Image (cartoon, rainbow, N blue to C red):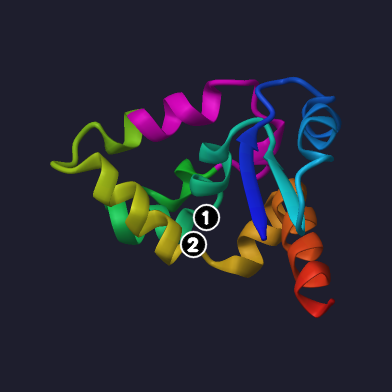
Amino acid sequence: MLILLVDADGVPSRKRELDAVVSDLPGTKLIAVAVNEFESWLVSDGAALATVLGVESSKAPHHPESLAPSVAKARLQELTDTVQDARRARLSLAQNVDLATLIARCPAFAKCLDELQTLLKR
């Protein structure tokens, strides 16, 4: 199975473009497009931000996928500027984010998860 995760970066046709690129590859494929960037998923859960980074949970945007391209990336950079290991902090955020919150606040993530579950049932 090929799983390709890319940022939309404000390009609505990103998934369609990538579907065309990988259509001739053998096997099962899932193209997940983070709107507008993967970092929007990482900043979606205020409780995870508070736990991992020690910041106010209100720092999480209620609609992270509605942020303009580069805004979530910049927000995450700003939030991790004070930690010693930003890479580890990002990993910890991914491990601590509440899946229900992520699904509720990030429709593109919910769609990706639904597509993955459908593929795994085949």
Q: Position of residue 20 (x, y in %)?
A: 85, 31
12 left or right of 49 in image: right
**Between residues 49 and 9, which one lies in front from this camera angle?**
9
**Between residues 48 and 69, which one lies in front from this camera angle?**
69
Which residue is labeled 1 in the image? 45
28 left or right of 98 in image: right
Q: Is residue 59 above or below residue 21?
A: below
Can you see residue 68?
yes
- The residue lying furthest to the bottom in this view is 121
Q: Position of residue 47 (x, y in %)?
A: 45, 61
Residue stretch rendered in magenta on the structure: 61-77
Which residue is labeled 2 in the image? 97
**Between residues 7 and 43, which one lies in front from this camera angle?**
7
Q: Position of residue 101 (x, y in %)?
A: 62, 62
**Residue drawn at the location 57% of the way across and 47% of the way down:** 41
Q: Amino acid at mark 2?
A: Val
